[in-house]
Image: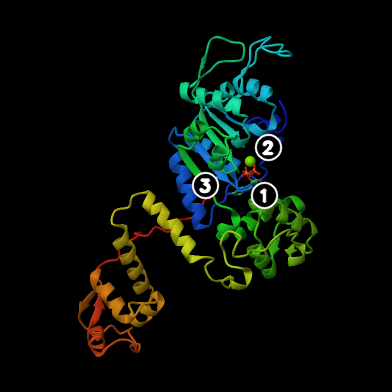
Amino acid sequence: MTAHLLTLPDSPALALALSIRAKALLFHDPRSLALLHQIERLARTEATVLLVGETGTGKELVARHVHQLSGRSGPFVAVNCGAFSEQLIDAELFGHEAGAYTGAAGARAGWFEAANGGTLFLDEIGDLPLALQVKLLRVLQERQVVRLGARRPVALDVRLVAATNVDLQRAVQAQHFRADLYYRLNVAPLALPPLRERQGDILPLARHFIGVYGPKLGLAHARLAPEAQAALLQHAWPGNIRELENVVHFALIVCRDGLVRREDLRLVGPAMTASAGGRPAPAQLPPLDAPPDAQERLAALFDTLLAERTPALYPLVEETLVRCAYEACNENQVRSARLLGVTRNTLRTLLKRHGLLVDALPHPGDDVLPAETDDHAKMSQAAATVRGPMSPGALRHEQPHP
Ligand SMILES: Nc1ncnc2c1ncn2[C@@H]1O[C@H](COP(=O)(O)OP(=O)(O)OP(=O)(O)O)[C@@H](O)[C@H]1O
Ligand SMILES: [Mg+2]
């Protein structure tokens, strides 16, 4: 057994070998929240989960979370498939009887057996030698394992979570990965977006790591200077969350007076460009107090609602949006229209469609009409007021994970 091999979180002796240093998970950006919901749904099933993401995006942390949420009472066993020779991983995964090969003095259970009743995390599954891919497939199909040199199979109750930072489909095309195993593993794929594509996570994660490392360095109330925040948001983070964690840790060591300044951040490599993750170059980024990327946030929310098969989503979204804007503007049509970026006529059509307008007295909050509205609209607008109760929570506001 080597140090990179496995991580058994419940074993204090092995805790030191954990590659995961800060164990708390943080999901703040809407894309991450959508991911969290997906994780929560999948965790409770028996489905094999395939985590796909660049290095440092949190695949191992998510694998542990899947195990925790699954309610399985057995252990979480993590195996790095890239860390062994072919013969060694064979024996490690499937176990062996005494004398099964030179040097196998006693019988030993493999990692599959060790994970019985729990979860087996096969990290860097793309590095698994082809010969072992066949064996793995057989184990997954038959739900039993035969130790090297043994005859009798051992029945398995193991949840499998695999992770890769290589494109397995391409590996299949290049014949480095078996197509049948790929389809077997790809039952429930979970894509972990790179940090540059979930900008809303950057500052909360930075503060989270300040909270983790600050007290250890005697900095109970360390904080980020505004120009340091801007630099963090503009960096492309090729090493993702692990890189951010290291940058914050180092900055806390070198900063003065508990204030992390731009010059304390050791940011290596590219800043954000249009080609990096398809996001705008730093010069075109919205101001810091603007929402990082409204379209991305909406897409994440809609992905969740679509996945939940929310009925009549389109009218629901329209109605909720109009209601929210109208309420936020104290039922003032001109300001509501401006807020939504539509003409007053369009707004009125929408208000009527969703039963929010009745012909009645003018609303005291309404002010002058914009140039694009016609006289007829002016007249009917003057007679408009609101009716109908707000339907609470139609568009759910996702809370960050504690
Ligand atoms: N959502 C998160 N909240 C807080 N910390 C996180 C989160 N995701 C990842 N981290 C931190 O980032 C680091 C990298 O996470 P992890 O090892 O799970 O990534 P990985 O995708 O397995 O990386 P690799 O592909 O290099 O093995 C860890 O130290 C972990 O503490
Ligand atoms: Mg990992």
Amino acid type for the residue under numbered disc 2: Leu
Q: Position of residue 65 (x, y in %)?
A: 54, 40
Disc sitting over residue 242 in the figure? 1
Specify few, some or many for label 3: CA neighbours under 10 Å numbering under 14, 14-19, or 20 or more. some
Would residue 402 appear left or right of 16 to someone viewing this image?
left
User: Rounded to the nearest whole Å, what is the CA distance between mark 1 and mark 2?
Assistant: 14 Å
Asked if the residue under mark 1 is in contact with the one under mark 3, i.e. CB atoms within 8 Å, the reply is no
Considering every residue shown, the one lying at the far left of the view is 359
Amino acid type for the residue under numbered disc 3: Ala
Sooner in the amino-acid sequence: mark 3 or mark 1:
3
User: Rounded to the nearest whole Å, what is the CA distance between mark 3 and mark 2?
Assistant: 23 Å
Would residue 95 appear left or right of 160 to someone viewing this image?
right
What residue is pinned by disc 2?
18
Sooner in the amino-acid sequence: mark 3 or mark 2:
2
Label 3: which secondary element: strand
The residue at the point 39 percent across, 73 percent down is 328
The quadrant the N terminus occupies is top right
Disc number lying in front (1 or 2): 1
Asked if the residue under mark 2 is in contact with the one under mark 3, i.e. CB atoms within 8 Å, the reply is no
What residue is pinned by disc 3?
191
Residue 273, visible in the rendered structure: yes
Q: Nearer the viewer, residue 369 or 112?
A: 112
